Amino acid sequence: MKDTTPHGFRRWRRTRPFWGGAFAVLGGAELIAIPLAPMPLVVHQGIAGVASWLIGALLIAAGALMWFQPAQRSFFGILAVLLSLASFLTSNFGGFLVGMLLGVLGGALGFAWSPARPRGQDGPDGPEPARPRASGHG
């Protein structure tokens, strides 16, 4: 008999909002990387660089906490969205929109994720009613 239950990293990934956390971490890393870029396109320098570091670090923390504390995914998802929107004003237009959009997407995915019900478990209203089978008889 073939065992179809996921093991290792695959099981860990499926029991938490993995992609929401991944996009939030990527958005935070991008916000931190923009002030470090050696290009003259950086719109804000000085205090805005500190804001980029702070918002980026908090966004990375929110994404990591979505992974390691999936029960509080709603709070961390909303926090990631709010931090990403705040980055538009405080850190180079949200990392030239890329970091902001990654953070908003990650926060939304983290907020929307819900754990899958184990097989054989009934829903909150009891077992699902049996569906009538389609038959070829008139």
Image (cartoon, rainbow, N blue to C red):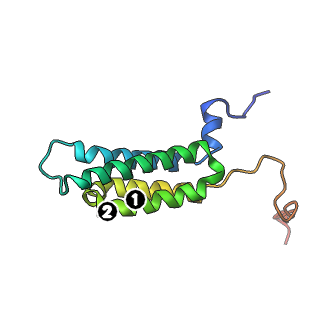
* Residue 6, picture quadrant: top right
Q: Which mark is residue 88?
A: 2
Residue 25 lies, in percent from the top left, at 44, 45
Name the residue beneath numbered marker 1: 84
Residue farthest along the top direction in this orientation: 1
Q: Are marks 2 and 1 in contact (CB under 8 Å)?
A: yes
Per the image, label 1 sits on a secondary structure element best described as: helix
Give the camera-side residue of 81 and 112: 81
Please tell me which residue is depicted at 45% across the width and 57% down the height of the picture. Answer: 105
Where 128 falls versus 49 (above or below)? below
Residue 106 lies, in percent from the top left, at 47, 53
Identify which amino acid the numbered label 2 is placed on: Phe
Residue farthest along the front direction in this orientation: 47
Identify which amino acid the numbered label 1 is placed on: Ser
Distance from disc 2 to disc 1, alpha carbons, whole Å, reads 7 Å
Where 109 falls versus 69 (above or below)? below
Residue 110 lies, in percent from the top left, at 55, 54
